[in-house]
Image (tube, coloured by chain):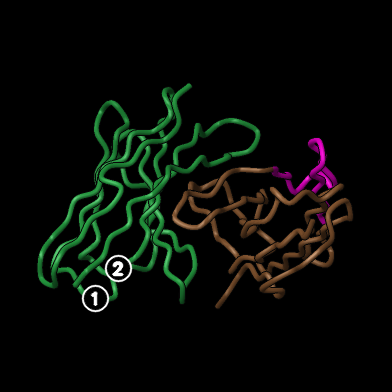
Amino acid sequence: DQQVKQNSPSLSVQEGRISILNCDYTNSMFDYFLWYKKYPAEGPTFLISISSIKDKNEDGRFTVFLNKSAKHLSLHIVPSQPGDSAVYFCAASQNTGKLIFGQGTTLQVKP
Amino acid sequence: KAGVTQTPRYLIKTRGQQVTLSCSPISGHRSVSWYQQTPGQGLQFLFEYFSETQRNKGNFPGRFSGRQFSNSRSEMNVSTLELGDSALYLCASSSPGLAIDTQYFGPGTRLTVL
């Protein structure tokens, strides 16, 4: 039973354009949602998070949107840069020290 | 602040052996969580320790165990290794009580079981 799903295994965008990564969840008890970026053989790097009481959070080029009724969140990267090429994971938490991760989306930003 | 550190970074063992992995959290963080990453299963939660107590446990067999020390450093042990235990083992630390319990990850230990 996969509680957090990233249905797009990969995404390719042109440098300077917007990248939109999507994530769906099934457990309405999740309180917090986080996005991580990961390179091979390294640990995930925290990017941005959002509490379930909000519907948007921005940090520089990164914006996360949360639609609770649809149980859907998305990460927008504007403008996309070649250095953004990595695997992106969304994760959900009930603030119990346990993160439930999606399967990841590989983003490729082409120069 | 120094980040989360994990030792060793790489490890090769044979089936049936046991292994201990170590994790030092960010200074001031009292919660340490462990995850296993494999190509087929993705990132899966193993367990979480806070103030030397296991607060949460994932769906892994009893061969996987851990502990936390009074300085918040944590160790994870896997006994009777199986080929399927080959994975990247990640630990993450956090400071519960903040608005969002953000976990910060170490670089991982790559375990290969032959």
Vertical side of A3 occupied by A82: above or below: above
Q: Amino acid at mark 1?
A: Leu
Dominant SS type (magenta): strand
Badge 1 local density, few (<14 within 10 Å), some, or many (20+)?
A: few
Q: CA distance from mark 1 to mark 2?
A: 6 Å
Residue A106 screen position, x and y as percent:
65, 65
Residue identified by numbered label 1: B83
Relative depth, front residue between B77 and B40:
B40
Residue B29 screen position, x and y as percent:
44, 29
Residue appearing at x 10%, y 65% in the figure: B17
Badge 2 local density, few (<14 within 10 Å), some, or many (20+)?
A: some
A61 with respect to A98 (left or right): right
Relative depth, front residue between A76 and A4:
A76
Rendered hue of chain B is green
Magenta highlight on residue B37? no
Residue occupying the far right of the picture: A17
Can I make out residue A18 in this image? yes
Circle 1/circle 2 CB separation < 8 Å: yes
Q: Which residues are drawn in magenta?
A: A48-66
Q: Amino acid at mark 2?
A: Ser
Q: Pointer 1 indicates a residue of which chain? A: B
B79 with respect to A56 (left or right): left
Magenta highlight on residue A63? yes
At numbered mark 1, what does the secondary structure look like: helix, strand or loop? helix
Rendered hue of chain A is brown
Residue identified by numbered label 2: B86
At numbered mark 2, what does the secondary structure look like: helix, strand or loop? loop
Residue A47 screen position, x and y as percent:
66, 43
